[in-house]
Structure formats: C-alpha cells, structure tokens
Image (cartoon, rainbow, N blue to C red):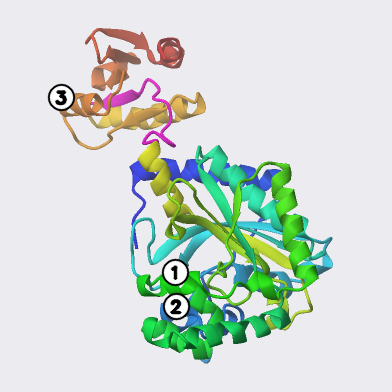
Amino acid sequence: MHDILPHEAQAWERFCKLAKDIAGFYGFSKIETPMVESEELFARTIGETTDIVEKEMYLVRGGGGTRLVLRPEMTASVVRSYLQHGLHRLPQPQRFYYLGPAFRHENPQAGRYRQFYQFGLEILGGESDPVYDAQVIIAFCKLLESLKIKDFAVGINSIGSIAERQNYKKKLVDYYRHHIGEICRNCKKRIKTNPLRLLDCKTKVCQPIKSDAPIILDYLSIASKSHLKNVLEFLDEINIPYVLKPHLVRGLDYYNKTVFEIFLSSEGEDDTALVGGGRYDYLAESLGGRSTPGVGGSLGIERVLEIIKGRDPSFGVPRQSKQVFLVHVGQLAKRKGISLLEEFREANIPVVSNLGKSSLSNQLESADRAGAALALILGQKEVFEENIIIRDMRTGVQETVPLTKVVKELKKKL
C-alpha cells in the first residue's frame, strides 16, 4: 500500500490526462466497476489454479452468503458489466478504458504494491479481428511515447485456441517430467494443475528448463498462426518494435490467441514489463454469456511513473507562476480576506492564504517559504480605508492601492 502525496499528485494527474486523451482519440469510453466483486467471478475467469486466485486475492468479510473479494484485476469486471447491462445490444465492438486500483497479496517490490493502479483498454464484441489486437497494442505504445518512454518493445506470442493447447500441454508435461528434480516446488504442482503456468514461472532455477521447453507455435492451427501474422503486419505498418516470445503465456487463464507484454527494451528483462494483455474470446462464455470476442490490456501506473520519475523529475510539475500570498492582521481583515479570495478566484488569479491566527511577521515568513513573488497585506486600517498593501517579496518595496483596483494591479504585475 502507498500514499500519493501532494507533490506526487501532479505527476499522477498529468499521467491520467495523457491516458484519457489517448483513449479518447482511439474511441474508448470510460467505464468504472466496483472494487469489491464476487470471488466466483475471478475463479471462473482468471482460473481456480492460478496464483492470483489461490494465493493473492483479499477476501472481504461481511459478504453474507456470497464470498466477496477486492478485485485483483479489472478485465473480468468489465466483461461482467458488459453482459449484465446488455451492452452487447449496442453497436459493436464496444471500446472501454478504465483507471483505478486493484489489489493482490504479492511480494512488494520497486513499482509494485499490494494496492496498485491500472490504466486499461478493452475492446468487446464484433469480430475476432487481429486489427483490434493491434489497435490495443498501438494505443499503449502511443501512450508510452507521449510519456517520453520510447525505449520499449512489444513481446508477443500466440497461445492458440483451447483445443490447440491440449496437445501442446501433453508435450509440455512430458518435457517437464523429465526434469522433475530440477524445477521449483510450485512448478511440480503446476505440472498437475495448470501446465501452461510452468512457462510463467520466474524462479531462477526453472529458467534453463523453460528456455528449452517445447514451443507452442509449433502446435497451432493455420488459422491461429494467420491471426498472429496479421497482428504483426499491422504493427509493422506503423513501425511498432516487437519481438516474438515463444514462451510468453501471461498469468491468467482466460487468454487465447494473442498475448503480449510491453517492456523496456533497454533493460531486456521480463520483470520490467509495463503493459500486459491479450485476446480473450472465451471469457464472456465462462460468465454465462454468448460467445463474445474480446481483447485488451492494462498498464501498471506506479511502475510507469517510477520510470518517468527517474528520467524526468519535473514530469507533471506545472511551470511556476508568480505566486501571490494574502496576509491578514485581525478578525476584520480575515473576514474581508474571505471575500477577496473569491474575487481573485473569479479573476483566475491563484492566491495562497493563511487564515489562521499567525502574526504579520510569521505570515510574511510563510509567504517567503512558499516562494511568493507578491504579498497582499490587509489590516484593520486598510479595511476601513478600503485599501490593500502590495509588497514585492524580492525587493521589499510596498505600495498601497484601492481594493477596487487590486485585481487590475495584480494582473499587470503577474
């Protein structure tokens, strides 16, 4: 878990604006789903034997007869909402984007937290057309470029259909059983429960075994291979850099055909993946809906902001304008100060104020610490005379102007 402090919030707001702009350009509309969902939703879609469902979901107490959890990801929730609210009856496909927190009980590390924020894109309905796979990937790539992250590449693979994977799983299990004494404890379990997850293992001891494992592309149909080929041709058309990753499977059971990650090519490590996603044509059916093509992905916001912060500490920080600090002395001046602040707001003049009980010297010191260019000093005498003092904080020069002209004078000085 982590806090977003005031000095960090500007970078978050900047990211969110850029993400929404990209989503809007490509025709995605915002969708919001609850942070609390039924446990069954994720067991049926992500997979009962995945690490997320078995180990990483947070159970919510007080759910009555329904076991509730904090959402570990948002694709399943978006598909549930699409089906529940009859969005399949609208013109297809439907495009959605979301921004929000998800929760997983996993080991915290740099840029990864147990509460983490995702920006996601989903395309549901229509045809299972490779152009939609490419469009999702392209949109994420263009977002990274707008964030000045250009040293990325797309890792991509196809895991085919459910039927095509069956023969491959048998070959994979046979291969791993020949190396049973060399793999980690979790992988020994995965051989029996979820063989594809063997390729998702990050344990160091398993990497040499994985690198020599059978390649799923060798077991795919002509149709699945053609789908992947078309996706790559769309990426080639606009020079999106990609590499084929024959052992990429992603950690969720609902994917078929295209799976992808976008990672920092300068690092060359899978654990620096910024975006992950793929096609999920069977997900709606697993929730009781009719066959509905779908493709999408999500970006880890904390991880991306961590990279940006290391490269450009000024990201999201607005250009410093000449700040104005309102100083008051006495209760009468405080009351007048409240109405003055509204005048400044209507005139679009940003003013900082301290309406507590600090002395004149303390308030001027606060103005100096805040980096204010000008201080407006209002005391009882000024209120009665309907004047205000404008003080240049750099030179100390002061001038008295009528309250009726203070907005005009500030605009000239700013």
- Kind of residue at badge 2: Met
**Residue at coordinates 38% horizontally, 67% vertically from top-left?**
114
Q: Position of residue 176 (x, y in %)?
A: 49, 84
**Residue at coordinates 44% horizontally, 56% vertically from top-left?**
269
Q: Which residue is mark 2?
A: 57
**Which mark identifies residue 361?**
3
Relative to 274, residue 373 above or below: above
> Quick one: 89 or 65, which is closer to the camera?
89
Question: What is the magenta range?
Answer: 312-329
Left or right? Give the position of 392 relative to 311: left
Q: Residues within 10 Å of mark 3 (few under 14, many from 20)?
A: few
**Which mark identifies residue 103?**
1
Q: Position of residue 296 (x, y in %)?
A: 65, 61
Q: Nearer the viewer, mark 2 or mark 3?
A: 2
320 within the magenta span: yes
Q: Residue 70: tell me if it is visible.
A: yes
Distance between the alpha carbons at the discs numbered 2 and 3: 54 Å
Q: Residues within 10 Å of mark 2 (few under 14, many from 20)?
A: many
Relative to 280, residue 315 above or below: above
**Cβ–Cβ under 8 Å for marks 1 and 2:** yes
